[in-house]
Amino acid sequence: MSSPDPDSDLHADVALRRGYVVDEFSTDEGTVVMVGLAPTFEVLRLSPLGVEILRLVGPGTTLARLEQDLRRLLGDPAVGELPDLVLAAVVELRHHSVIVAGQGHNGAIWAPSGADDRASPQGA
């Protein structure tokens, strides 16, 4: 028996926003972010695509809009399909709480409050 897909809610209209990014540091050699809720933090190095996604997500966007913006900025990938590549990157960033997805019951985009168990390092 397989467990439910935790990312099944990632569809074209799902709201995306920055997650629990506490700090960012960029140099010519790349970008690292510190992510999490006290007392647990994680430091991650972002790929160039991850940096672009974090920038484009900003205060809020949708998965479909993110894909459109990436296509406009970067063009179509040489290998693979853009929707699949964007989804894979969003899933990875979401699992590390760099971005959060979904809406609260009142339609507002979730704020970093621990409401999304994937967004909290403690799972709360």
Image (tube, rainbow, N blue to C red):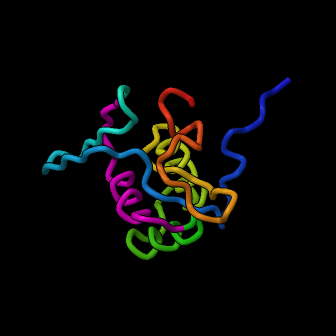
Q: Residue furthest bottom?
A: 72
In-front residue for pair 81/94: 94
Q: Is residue 96 magenta?
A: no
Residue 113 on image: x %, y %: 50, 45
Vertical relation: 44 (above or below) 20 = above
Q: Is residue 9 left or right of residue 31?
A: right
Residue 36 on image: x %, y %: 39, 36
Q: Is residue 77 left or right of residue 11?
A: left
Q: Is residue 67 left or right of residue 44?
A: right
In-front residue for pair 33/89: 33
Q: Is residue 59 magenta?
A: yes
The magenta stretch spans which residues?
A: 41-61
Tell me the residue at 37%/26% (across/down): 40
Tell me the residue at 47%/71% (across/down): 71
Vertical relation: 88 (above or below) 57 = above
Residue 97 on image: x %, y %: 46, 41
Q: Residue furthest right?
A: 1
Tell me the residue at 55%/55% (across/down): 110
> How many marks on residues?
0
Q: Quadrant of the N terminus?
A: top right
Tell me the residue at 40%/66% (across/down): 56
Q: Residue furthest top?
A: 1
Residue 42 on image: x %, y %: 35, 31
